[in-house]
Amino acid sequence: MNTEIFVLDSEDIDRSVIQRAGKIIKDGGLVAFPTETVYGLGGDALNPGSSARIYAAKGRPSDNPLIVHIADMEALSKIVTEIPEGAFKLAEAYWPGPLTMIFHKKPVVPYETTGGLDTVAVRMPSDVIARELIKASGGYIAAPSANLSGRPSPTSASFVKEDMDGRIEMILDGGDSEVGLESTIVDFTDVHPMILRPGYITEEMISSVLGVEVGLDPALKRDDPSFRPKAPGMKYRHYAPKGELVIVTGPQDLVTERINAMVREDSEKGFSTGVMASGDTASLYRADSVKALGAKGRAEETAHGLFRALREFDDEGIDRIYSESFAGPGVGTAIMNRLIKAAGHHIIQL
Ligand code: TXA
Ligand code: MG
């Protein structure tokens, strides 16, 4: 299949391209598109055949449900049985934006889209290209991140092309993703709301709007497969670069010393090496490829550059990657959730 790529200017969107993309989705085809979090791989959420094609294009296990993207609140009530008070409050505070909520689904949403579940994940993105595309496609776009299963989520159209060229009808290029990490997921289908995936909208932001403490799914805090995360996708190894990734954490001077020692050892053995560090410490490292992920304490910058860095190490053919820890308040939780998964829980604590 020939994958068409169109560059769109979000200040002056070419309607004819959006109409064409919308028609592809209505006809059961797939279009990758920008959102403020990461690029999505979109198909008609109410068409079981489209969801099946999404799984095939990604090489993704079909028990891993998709997020349904909508452009307005009217669309929500047509696909969910009930909207709890708390969900209304969060929608008012953070929609459109990088937040996904889980509801009980109406029969109109096919099980192919929800991975067999009676619940459905819904998000209203803020990206204007995404919103125009949703409206032109009939109102409901199922979209996982537009990467091959297991690879880091794409934060630019060229990364989408790397993974999806020849597998889908169209890619809309809207430039770099603003946030760089996937949306925060909040579940409203249980007795208490719970965060199933940390993201840019933090635990504190959600708790303060709801007026109750909303916690993170406890299964995410353990490296133990017998604890199953409620979001099926969180159990898969994910975001992984091709090289082996290890996180080193502890006092800065010890971390720097240890990483440089491991880099030296690897180089002597003939491995190419990479380091991910903060902008303040990057110059202390002597690897083949050193990536600065924003100044210390500027978690938004780190989030923005994390998946790009992981993909660049792949392109550079790096065998061994060492990363500083980016733990911290707020978005730090989401960054470490992705980084620890990318490292397959390989952490050296000094
Ligand atoms: O920011 C995002 O959310 C991006 C952009 C494209 O919108 N999308 C995204 O989709 O990250 P995906 O498919 O890569 O991740 C969806 C996550 C998976 O972990 C999946 O298991 C979970 O949402 N999920 C979807 N529906 C669910 C449901 N009904 N119950 C529990 N978890 C669900
Ligand atoms: Mg994904």
Image (cartoon, rainbow, N blue to C red):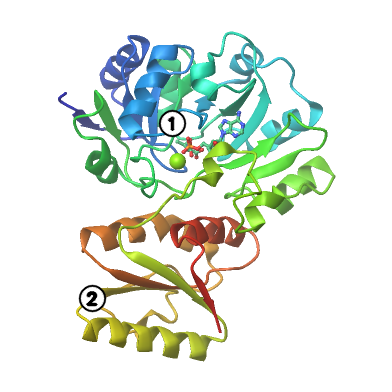
Q: Residue at x 48, y 85 (%)?
A: 255
The spot of residue 80 in percent (x, y) is 66, 17
Relative vertical location of residue 215 with respect to residue 131 in this rendering, above or below: below
The spot of residue 116 in percent (x, y) is 56, 21
The spot of residue 162 in percent (x, y) is 23, 43
Q: Secondary structure at mark 1?
A: helix
Residue 111 in view in this figure:
yes
Q: Which residue is mark 2?
A: 271
**Is 193 left, or right, of 335 in this rendering?**
right
Label 1 to label 2, Cα distance in Å? 44 Å
Q: Nearer the viewer, residue 10 or 48?
A: 48
Q: Residue at x 80, y 41 (%)?
A: 210
Amino acid type indicated by mark 2: Phe
Ligand 2 near label 2 (Cβ, under 8 Å)? no
Amino acid type indicated by mark 1: Val
Relative vertical location of residue 33 with respect to residue 233 in this rendering, above or below: above
Q: Secondary structure at mark 2?
A: loop
The number of numbered discs placed on residues in the rendered structure image is 2
Of callouts 1 and 2, the N-terminal one: 1
Q: Quadrant of residue 161?
A: top left
Q: Residue at x 55, y 45 (%)?
A: 234
Q: Which mark is residue 128?
A: 1
